[in-house]
Image: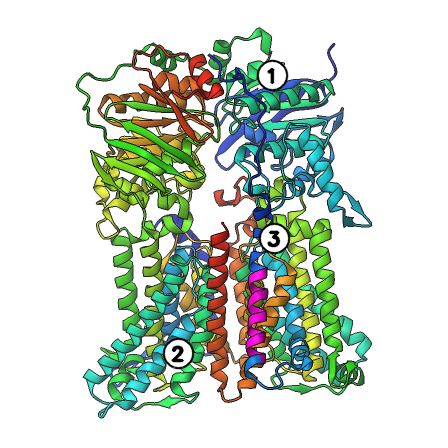
Amino acid sequence: MVDPPILQMTGIRKTFPGVVALDGVDFSLRPGEVHALMGENGAGKSTLIKVLTGVYGIDAGDITLDGAPVRFGGPLQAQQAGISTVYQEVNLCANLSVAENIFIGREPRRFGKIRWSEMRRRSAELLAGLDLHLDVAAPLGTYSLAIQQMVAIARAIDISAKVLILDEPTSSLDASEVERLFQVMRRLKRDGVAILFISHFLDQVYAVADRMTVLRNGTLIGEYATAELTQMQLVTKMIGKELTVLERLEEEPRTVTADAPRQPIVEAHELGRTGAIAPFELAIRGGEIVGLAGLLGSGRTELARLLFGADRPDHGTLKIDGRPVTLRTPRMAMNHGIAFSSENRRTEGVVGELSVRENIVLALQASRGWSRPIPRRKQDELVERYIKTLGIRPADPDVAVRNLSGGNQQKVLLARWLITEPRLLIVDEPTRGIDVGAKAEIQRLLVELADGGMAVLFVSAELEEVLRLSHKIEVLRERHLIEEVDNTGGGVDADRIMQAIASGAKS
Amino acid sequence: MTDVKAPPQPEVTVATPHKRRRADRRHIPVLATLALLVLMYSLGVANYDNFSDTQVLLNVFVDNAFLLVVAAGMTFVILTGGIDLSVGAVVALTTVVAATLLNDGWPAAVVLPLVLLIGTTLGLGMGAVIHYFKVEPFIATLAGMFLARGLSLLINRNSIPITDPFWTAMAQERIRFGPGIFISTSVVIAAVVVLAGAAVLAYTRFGRTVYAIGGNADSALLMGLPVGRTRIAVYTISGFCSALGGVLLSFYMLSGYSLHAQGMELDAIAAVVIGGVILTGGSGYLFGTVLGVLVLGLIQTIITFQGTLSSWWTKIVIGILLFAFIVLQRLVTRRAR
Amino acid sequence: MTPLVRHRLFWPAVVLVLLLVSNVFFAPRFFTITLQDGHLYGSLIDVLRSATPLALVALGMTMVIATGGIDLSVGSVMAISGAVACLFIGDLSDPGSVGGVLLAVGLALGLSAVAGIWNGVLVSVIGIQPIIATLILMVAGRGIAQLLTGGQIINVSSPPFRVIGAGYLLGVPVSVIIVAVVVAAAVLLIRRSALGVLVEAVGASPTASRLAGIRARGLTIMAYVFAAVCAGIAGLIFSSNVASADSNAAGNLIELDAILAVVIGGTALTGGRFSIAGSVLGAVLISALDITTYTIGVPAETTLLFKAVVVVILCLSQSAAFRAAVFRRRRTPAATPAAEVPA
């Protein structure tokens, strides 16, 4: 049963000053299918979506919807024509209520007056259909990112789109929420909705997509049925080289160097913060990678922030090198050799306006104070070294960081902390939303750093990644640290951890 | 090795433990202002004879009707996260144009809509420059301020008295509730503007879009809201309100003068902020702005009642109270968080 | 200075030159600079002299705006500074004593610094939005200055004090020298140390800066103190020049001109990247504008109108969106962020 495509894009070309973002790309979408758009960062996925929804104009090519040529002036027009989008970042208004976020722009009205009670009732019904039971009158900002994302999807679904674009909707959802989303997607599929799905998680794509279109560097590589392409073949098409790095890393046995110091660098006793993370015990030694596993909202980030002084604990003690300390500010943690790379790269990590050079030296400069500038020659030397080691692209220290891709921004952030030569490096989701190649490079880097004697606290939503890198895994569930699993032999499997997360067994 | 393999997970329900407190938090700045207003009034009544007369309170409205209208327009702008520095100058321009035309024998029925149109057009122009050319509101409306003030100076440097019968009738018309208890027509006009504005903000798509833009303009755009049109509209509304405020001021003063309403933009901004509207946009109520205007008016009244204070004390006291209000609101909202 | 900054300042510089040149048609001797009694005289010198208070205020404003703030109170600080100095000198047994005048200057600047600390603490410790925090001192400060002078204009006759605003050193007006020295010292301090980049980081992204270990609080207070001290010096120059303290006129509406100068100079009001050279250029441009309306013989009433037109032209010329609309091909990268409105 091959339906004619509802959406057809042919020969799409889009250029920005100095860059060809899309070059002769074709794309077609049939009703009742989930179609994955695959490619590394910078392949042109986001640009293609923005071109489709009219955020950008196109330089050449045709777009037809239901057989008729269309050219949208913006997301509003696209939405009216039946194309709704849920973007990677939650693009809602946190100050408005949940109900308003679902209905704004198309509120139920009588004589031009918004019918608030009707709107609340319908929102509650809609969300209940997704197993979400929220106070729809509460401001959206009082809910977690995952919930906000689900609200965004609810909004898009309710617009009863012919075409639903999901741009990385799963990156802030935990496994059960992802499954729920997939159920919704399958239901929509049965109803004949065409879904364009973007995700960095290959497994998710294989779980839900019927067909996929692969882009690389702004050009079309091909269109494939999911069933006919193995994951390995797909990855090869996406990055155009064999995944040697990734494979080699998986082979590496995980062992702590024998002469690792026994004195922990950081010890937490009954450390906790009300509403963020329940009191926990944790010791991190030099040369080891400690992984934090748990679902979204389980308190992973909150735990990490306490160790960096980004938030203040209201319970327990923290010892560094055996001596009790109080970390009131990030700066105090830095003075003890602790570094923290936030999960929110763009808002809490890099300063987009500043150059690569300035971003890389920022933390070191901050710890020296304003009156002792790092000499320019020293800066150049450091920056050049890390641009080379980490493979930051473009390799121009004077380009503004906001012009870099997500993966390269993450590398800049890591470089910033590495030049401070920390003893404990806390990395929160360093590989989220970045392409496979960069991901493997960052994983390898962390292993090397630990081998060199640095302590690493590794936070990631991807269990597989945590298992592969960590010597020790701390399992979190509902803001409690419930179990510590030794992984020095590398023998722990994912089911073991998942069971702990699911059952909440106290050890 | 999949991370999608969902663990046996009970259905996740999202708890809303602080539901009530959350809903209330948005009202705290307004309630704080209301409480302080009551406190100030009580202090006035306790310390000064005749302060408790109903007319004293009504006079606060009578003397500040024009400011109320201007501040209502400013509220729309600030809710989107913008600012309008041109309001005082547009008020002045309105009084000068109205006085000049009336003195030249133009009928009031023509002059009134004309001056409203001029102010609205100026607002529209500033909004268009801000939206289409991405000039910062602070700068675009600063240019508008220079323009309007310059135009009124160009028309006439001196104060022009207004003798038009309609204008004088409007100035003298009193709506009486009893012996010595009255309001002016300007108060009625201001009340209509405030009620209409509040209804628009709470019950129309346009009003909700104003809040959405203040919350996150990029999101609003991606949600398909008419961001550009709305942004231009709020400056247009502010321009209209300034012109209407200018008309009310010319009723009040019965003159047109290019130096009228000097620094009124600051009074309007202060009123809006004391009323609990967040300057970055997206949060606050027009009702709060009314309270803010009343606070400023009551300060003036108390200073007048005190009688022995020189004019500069007004500034100092407004500054001190501005400080007290802001810090207090800050502490209250912070504790609630 | 990077080529980008130079590019940004290109249009303001062109406008400045055009303004100056246009004067020649009305005053042929506009560009003539003569030496009389060892003093340089000429319209260009007048432009510089009249730009001095504004340039200082704009310099301080630049740092505050770079932190993501704004300082509306600079005009009131100018008034307070002038009032304090004149009152102190008036009370001296010998108003002509250099020591006494220096003490008065120190007192005025010290008080200005206190005003700056007040603003800085409100903004960075209590966390009040800058425009509101400084609005407090803008309103109350003018009242305080009037309270100090009793609402009167305080005249002083003190030759050493007069030197600050009206004196000459090696033929050059002392006020111009003061501004040049302050600007040069500021540039040296800010760009040679790490102050500049740290302030830019704080202004561009406060959260990221905190997590990078930057202590924004101290930097912010420093910026407001710097702005207030600059305003204090400007107040001294202003009141020395007229040999009196006028609490109503001193620094009236100068905050708007200063903000304008900063924006003309290419510093965004949202904070982050800043350009001191740009702000000084902006101040000179505004001063040249005032002088030009005077030479051209435009009635004084229309100066504001004229200013409005120039502001519109300048802002439009700096608006990437406007340039994109006018010169289709000359789009700058800054004009294509993700959130761009469909053209």
Q: Which range of residues does the magenta coloring cover?
A: B31-45
Q: Are marks 2 and 1 on the same chain?
A: no
Q: Residues within 10 Å of mark 1 (few under 14, many from 20)?
A: some
**Image coords of residue C87 (percent x, y):** 32, 86
Near-viewer residue (B8 or A217): B8
Examine the rendered structure and indicate whether residue B14 appears above or below residue B47: above
- Chain letter for mark 1, please: A
Examine the rendered structure and indicate whether residue A37 appears above or below residue C87: above
Point 55% across, 30% down: residue: A46
- Chain letter for mark 3, please: B
Which residue matches tag 1? A208
Examine the rendered structure and indicate whether residue A328 appears above or below residue A174: below
From the viewer's perspective, is the residue at label 3 or at label 2 nearer? 2
- Three-letter amino acid code at the position of disc 3: His
**Image coords of residue C191 (percent x, y):** 28, 54
Q: Give me the C-alpha separation between circle 2 and circle 1.
A: 70 Å
- Asked whether disc 2 touches disc 1, contact meaning CB atoms under 8 Å apart, the reply is no
- Three-letter amino acid code at the position of disc 2: Ala
From the viewer's perspective, is the residue at label 2 or at label 1 nearer? 1
Point 51% across, 27% down: residue: A171
Which residue matches tag 2? C79
Coloring scheme used: rainbow
From the viewer's perspective, is the residue at label 3 or at label 1 nearer? 1
